[in-house]
Every structure is written in structure tokens, then in C-alpha cells.
Image (tube, rainbow, N blue to C red):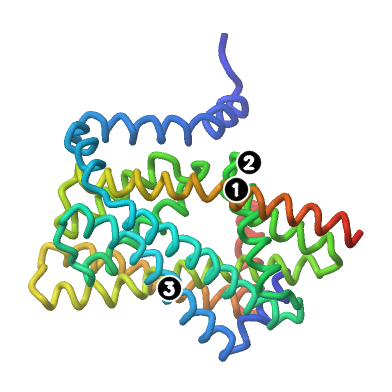
Amino acid sequence: MHNEYVSLGKGGRTLGVFFSLSIVNQLIQTLMFVPVLVSLDVPVELLTLIAVLPLSKAFVQLMPIPAGLGVAEGSQVVALSLAHVAPAQGLAVALVLRAIDLSMLLPAGIAYAADAWHMRRTA
Amino acid sequence: MTLSPSTRAALLKRWAPWILMALVVALMVHFLDLHTTLAAFNDIEPVAVALTAALFLLDRFSMAYKWNFLLRARNCRLSHWAAFRIYLASGFVGYVIPASVGSDVFRAARLSMTGRSGSSVSATIVLERVLGLLAILALSTVGLVLVVLQGRHDLLPLLGAVGGALCIGTVLTAVSMSTRLYQMLRRMTARFGDN
């Protein structure tokens, strides 16, 4: 696998485009917080949010907890408080995002079933 | 009854994540004003929730798109729809199977089952994780520099920590991508292993 990894790493253009797409992806993930913050009449410091919210995601990725339950909310509250969002409101935002994440299990489950059906059909 | 060190380590490995989770939740319950949190829910507009859900799906699509970009670079051709479907399905598995790498293992296994090279697919997933983390650190460093320049000097220690992590991460990634340095590191760690 390491040879494949090294081969991928030698593609400078591929890495550059992938890195740019990763940045865009992080920006989308940060923007996900904005509608709920606006809805709560919280002044949105977009630049601070862009600076600190991705860090909460990185922190959760390093924690061996299924779906980052609890730790994701805690780290988001801390990150949002750095952007001057009151902790209680920050928790409300984090819980709304968790609820949306959980509701996405329905389309994800449908995708899983569709994928299993697709695999069986093509086998 | 005394437990053997290996049993103790296994028990700790199994329960540590749950203990950590319970600790964080207990801290939030203790320090946060939950009445204000509950009251805040009344102010959230359904339109905001719908918009967030739409951005959530856009995020999943963009993640699947960039993974597919790496797959195509390794000649593992997938349609964007198939990549999106597998990515969504892996999210489902990631929730159901209590392991942080459950979704990654699902993606690798799923494509291996349809004849794609397992090592190629695994390499794209590892690179996705590594570059994803570097992208987070790079974006945060740039953002923090701008925020500090605007007068938020309280964030200077965080900028130092994130900038340091970015430098270390970049060096480690460069080492992992260099065959010669990687072999040297393997020899060094093997020597420690023998000792």
C-alpha cells in the first residue's frame, strides 16, 4: 500500500487540487454553522469561525469515540466561545447540528440499502 | 482478584472512550446553563435548519467528489453518483459500527469487493485523511493569523500551537511520501523493536 501512497504523493497537480478541494470542504463545514447562528441573532465573526471551527473537527478525528458523541459538541462549544458565542447558545447550535447529522442517517441508510442492492444485482 | 496487565489494558482500551464521553457530557451539564440552551431552541427558524441540512448534503457530496478525484488518479473509475452513494453508506456504517475507522474500512472493503485494488483504494483513504488534516491546520493557521492581525491577541498561543502542528504535520507527510526516508524510518523503528 505504501508504494501506491507514494505514487499518489508524486502527483503534484493531483495533490494540489485535492488540497484545494479539502479547503473548500472545510469552508462548507464552517458555513453549516452560520444559518443557525444567524437564526439565534448571534453576531457572526466569519473569519474567527473559519479559523477555529475546523480545529474542533480535527480534535474529534483524533478521539477514539464513535461519531465523536459528546466530544464533538464539547469541542464545538469551546470553538464557538472563541468566536464570542455564549456557551449555552453554542451548545444549542452543536445539538442542532448533531440532530441534522442523525437525521442524515435516513438518507445514509437508504444509500447503504441501494448500494447493497446494486452489489447483489451486479454480482 | 487481580487483573493481568494485558486484561487491564484491554479493559482500559474498551472503556476509555466511553468514560471520556461521559466526562465531557458531565462537564457540559455542570458548567453550561441548560435552560438557556433549551430556550435557544425556540429561536431557531426551520429555514435555518433546512439550509444547514442542505449544506450538510453539499459537504458530503464535496467529500465524495474529492475522494473520487484521488480514486481516478489511481485509475479506479467511479461515477460521482456511485462515489456519493458509497460515501453516504459509509457514514451509516460509521455510526452503526462503534469504531472511528468503521466508515474508512467500509469504503476500502466495498471497492475491493468489486475488483478494485485494495491497496490503491486504501492509499487514497490514507492520503485523504492526511491531507484533510493538513488542510484543516493550514486553513486555521491562515485564519488565525488574520484574526490576530485584527487585534485578537488572546488567540496568539492557539496560533503558535496550530502553526507548530502544521509544520510537524508537513514534515511527517513529506517523510511518509519519500521512499528513501520512509525506509530509513522503518529501519530505525525496527532496531528499536528488536531492543
Residue B73: percent from left, percent from top: 68, 83
Q: Is residue B193 left or right of residue B156?
A: right
Q: Nearer the viewer, residue A12 or B190?
A: A12
Residue beneath disc 2: B97
Q: CA distance from mark 1 to mark 2?
A: 6 Å
Secondary structure at numbered mark 1: helix
Q: Residue furthest left?
A: B151
Count of numbered badges drawn on the protein = 3
Residue B60, placed above or below residue B173: above
Residue at the image position 77 percent from the left and 63 percent from the top: B111
Q: Quadrant of residue B42?
A: top left
Residue at 20% x, 36% y is B32
**What number is the disc on residue B57?**
none
Q: Residue type at mark 2: give it.
A: Ile
- The amino acid type of the residue labelled 3 equals Ala
Sooner in the amino-acid sequence: mark 1 or mark 3: 1
- Specify few, some or many for label 1: CA neighbours under 10 Å numbering under 14, 14-19, or 20 or more: many
Q: Nearer the viewer, residue A116 or B178?
A: A116
Please name the residue that numbered disc 3 is placed on: B135
- On the same chain: label 2 and label 3? yes
* Distance between the alpha carbons at the discs numbered 1 and 3: 22 Å
Q: Where residue B131 appears, x then y in whole percent?
A: 51, 72
Inter-mark Cα distance, 2 to 3: 27 Å
**CB atoms at circles 2 and 3 under 8 Å apart?**
no
Q: Are the residues under marks 1 and 3 on the same chain?
A: yes
Q: Nearer the viewer, mark 1 or mark 3?
A: 1
